[in-house]
Amino acid sequence: MSPQAPRASMLQVFKAVLWSFFGIRKGAAHKADTLRLHPAQVVVAGLIAAALFIAILVLVVHFVIRHATA
């Protein structure tokens, strides 16, 4: 039996998801992530990160429109 790698914390999961948003990932870090990350954790973190990204974009657009018309 092979020893199981320790589970990743939520901070580590978000870090991996955010780096994947940029498309920048080292091979060794990707290998380590495949051992530690559970797919459900990645999906949830990805949905949360995408929702935050969209919310930030909406807030920026509202801010720009409000100041452009004033």
Image (cartoon, rainbow, N blue to C red):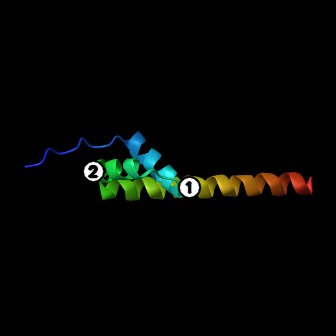
**Pointer 2 residue:** 35
The residue under the point 45% across, 47% down is 14
Q: Report if the CB atoms under discs 2 and 1 are less than 8 Å apart.
A: no
**Pointer 1 residue:** 22
Sequence-earlier tag: 2 or 1: 1
Query: Percent from the top left, x then y, of residue 55?
Result: 62, 55
Amino acid tagged 1 = Phe
Seen as rendered, the residue at the extreme left is 1
Foreground residue among 27 and 70: 27
Q: Tell how many labels.
A: 2
Amino acid tagged 2 = Leu
Seen as rendered, the residue at the extreme right is 70
Q: Say whether residue 22 is left or right of residue 70.
A: left
Around disc 1, counting alpha carbons within 10 Å, would you say few (fewer than 14), some (14 to 19), or many (20 or more)?
A: few
The residue under the point 67% across, 56% down is 57
Query: Percent from the top left, x then y, of residue 30?
Result: 38, 52
Mark 2 lies on a secondary structure that is helix
Q: Quadrant of residue 39?
A: bottom left
Q: Say whether residue 39 is left or right of residue 47.
A: left
Foreground residue among 9 and 54: 9
Label at residue 56: none
Query: Percent from the top left, x then y, of residue 9?
Result: 34, 40
The residue under the point 59% across, 55% down is 53
